[in-house]
Structures are given as structure tokens and as C-alpha cells.
Amino acid sequence: MNFTAEFFPENGTQPSEVNATTFDCDSSSYTPQGIASLRFQILIYLAYSAIFLTSIVGNVAVFLVVHLLPRMNTVTNLFIANLALGDMLMTIFCIPFSFVSIFVLQYWPFGAIICRIVNYSQAISVLVSAYTMIAISADRYLAIMWPLKPRVTKRLARILIFLVWTGALATAAPIPVFSTLIQPTEFYDHCDLSICTEVWPDDHSDHGYSLTLMTLQFLAPLIVLITTYVQIACKVWAKTPPGESVKQRDQRILQSKRKMIKMMITVVAVFTICWLPFNIFMLVPLDPDWRPLPYLWFLFHWLAMSHSCYNPIIYCYMNEKFRQGFRRLVEMIGRRCCCWMGATRRKSDASTNTEMLQLFPSTTLMTTVASGVGSAAGSREWCRKGL
């Protein structure tokens, strides 16, 4: 799937329709009608900036919470951290490059190598998210449907994560091969501008791979996820048979399982809502002169990109352990900052005290300095305990 398609330059006021002698190479001269309005441009800037910042902060926090806090280092959370890693890949390689090339400049200024890397990374990110959600559903399915069978270990989880990335890299492998820079109209040729897109040998290959990719990164995972979570939901929400007592401990475990399943079903639902419209939009042929088309493109593209920022919000809202983990992470960061500032201040104080002792070697001053040294030692001990 081509995320950096040459959509905006070829709609609205067509540069190719302008006489070659009157070409204006300012990209604003061919921005689609309505998109150039200041109000809409401000909306676009704010919308993409919001998802970029939220995604970076949220996904980095999830990744650090899982890997820095031993209590959060569970099998399911390792998969969740991998989801965060995939979302960070999308945030870094898709949102800024797509925003600049499609909405700001309407051409690709970053070169052919970055074009291949960006297109490849974007496809990998979606595939990693889809395959990781399948791994999570399989882990939950085995744990709930067959509780007496051996559980997935952390070692096996890491192997599965490696296989997820290997599968994603292999599935998206044709994209960097066929990604290139082209000049689709006389305008681009005259102004020496290019766009980043996929150029396949023929339309049949292009359409065939697009359908295959959509199936592997969206349709097939969605079928698997719906099937497994429906069976899991039937199991964990099944009524207790009459006359069979439920221990309080078992009830707590059951409630915990239900909360986790609710959270993962929400994650799958958000993934579907965000990516389904964009996938349909990219496959269905539409009239390029249709007036609402630029706005639909913006809406569906933003919705797809915004998926990268929702998962951390879901974890924080629906999982108490993640909320505690986020609070603990903030405390750790704050403590590190305080300790760093304290260490810097102690170095400065030590230098000052040394100079004072050389000038005024009195008993009172030595007592004061010794007190300061003891306080510094206590501060260092506090830092070690906190970290």
C-alpha cells in the first residue's frame, strides 16, 4: 500500500493544465480548492501535531514501564511493548514525512533512499501491530481455554516477537523494491520536483499485491481476532453452573481476566475503526474531480495515523497496573532529575568549600563542611534507593 501517494498535487488546480511558460513552482499554486484555506491548514497542523506528540510520549512510556518495572514484565505486556514499538515506528517514519510531503509541500523533498525506507517502515508498522495482536489473542486463548496446558514463557514470547518482525519484514519486502521517485506531470518536470510512490511493472501486479497486503495486515488478522476473542468472551463470561461455588480468589482471577479481555477487544476495535476506512479508500476507484475527495483523504489518513497514539490511552484508562506503572515511571524520572541536579550542585558546593577551607581553616567552618558532606552522602543514598 502506498501511503505517500501523489494525491494532492494531482487534484484541484492541475499544474499540468498551466502553460509551460507560466509555470509557478510555488506548491501553494496547485493546492486543491478549499485545502489552501487558513482555517483548514491550522486544523491539519494541530491534528497531526497532536497525534505525533501523544504517540511519542505514550508509546515510549509503555515501552519503559514494561521493561524497567519487573512487576510489569509479563508475557502479555511484552507483546504490548512490541505493539508500542510498532506504533513508534509508524509515528517516526509516517506522520512527519507524510505530513510534510502531502500536506505542506505537495512533493517529496527527502530523496529516493528515504522514500524506500519510509514506505517500507510504514507497511512494517501496520503488519507488526496486526501480527502482535494475533500473538496476544493466541496467548490469551491458550491461557483461558486450556488453563492446564503449559503457558507461554517469556523466552517463547521473545521468539514470537522475533518471528512477528521477521514476518512483517518479509511481507513488506516488495515495497522498497518498487518505491521510487517520479515526475508524473509536466509541472513536476519543469520545476524539477518529484513524488514518492510505488511503480510496479503492470497494474495487475500492483493491484494483486495491494489486495494481498490488505488481506495479510487487516482482513486475515481481523478474522482470527474476532474468532478467538468471541470464544474467549463466551468462556470468561459464562455463568457458573447452579450449585457450584466460586472461591473468592478464583473470582478475583476471573475478574482480572475479564478486564484484560475487555482491554484487548477495545484495542482490536480501535485498530479496525482506524484502518478500515483508509484501506477501503485506497482500493475503491474514485473520481479525482469529486469535490469532497481531499477532505475524505485527510480524514481517513489522519484516522489511520492516529491509531499509533490510542493504545497507551487505552492501557491507562482500562488497566490499573499500567496506571500504577505510569505513576512509578514519572516518579523515577523525577527522582533521576532531582539526583542529577543535586549531584551538579554538590560538585559546585564541594569546590566552593575547598576554596573556603584554604582561606579560612577554622574549626567552625570545618564542622559546617563536614555537615554538608554528610547531607550529600544521605542524598546519594536516597538516589540509590529510589533508582
Image (cartoon, grey):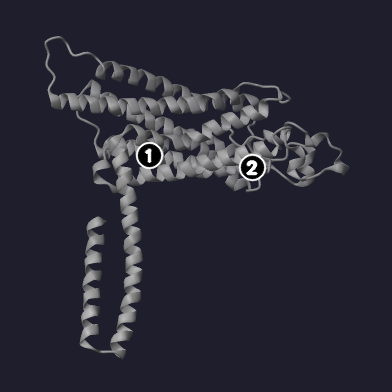
In primary-sequence order, the first of circles 2 and 1 is 1
User: Where does the image place residue 111, in percent across and percent down from the top left?
Assistant: 63, 48
- For residue 356, which numbered disc appears in the image? none
Q: How many residues crowd around disc 1 within 10 Å: few (fewer than 14), some, or many (20 or more)?
A: many
Looking at the image, residue 378 lies above or below residue 273: below
Q: Residue at x 58, y 35 (%)?
A: 3
* Relative depth, front residue between 237 and 347: 347
In the image, 294 versus 171, the foreground residue is 294
Confirm whether residue 148 shows in the render: no
Q: Are marks 2 and 1 in contact (CB under 8 Å)?
A: no
Percent coordinates x, y for residue 168 in the rendering: 45, 35
- Amino acid type, residue under disc 1 in the picture: Asn
- Residue at position x 84%, y 37% in the image: 18
Q: How many marks?
A: 2
- The residue wearing badge 1 is 82
Which amino acid is tagged 2? Ser
Using the numbered discs, state the Cα–Cα distance from disc 2 to disc 1 in whole angstroms.
28 Å
Q: Residue at x 33, y 85 (%)?
A: 355
- Looking at the image, is 102 positioned above or below residue 363? above
Residue 171 in the image, given as x and y percentages of width and height: 48, 33
| Image quadrant occupied by the C terminus | bottom left
- Asked if residue 349 lies left or right of residue 2, the reply is left
Relative to 385, say whether 250 is above or below.
above
Quarter of the image with the N terminus in it: top right
Judging by the rendered image, the residue that carries numbered circle 2 is 101
- What is the crowding at mark 2: few (fewer than 14 residues within 10 Å), some, or many (at least 20)? many
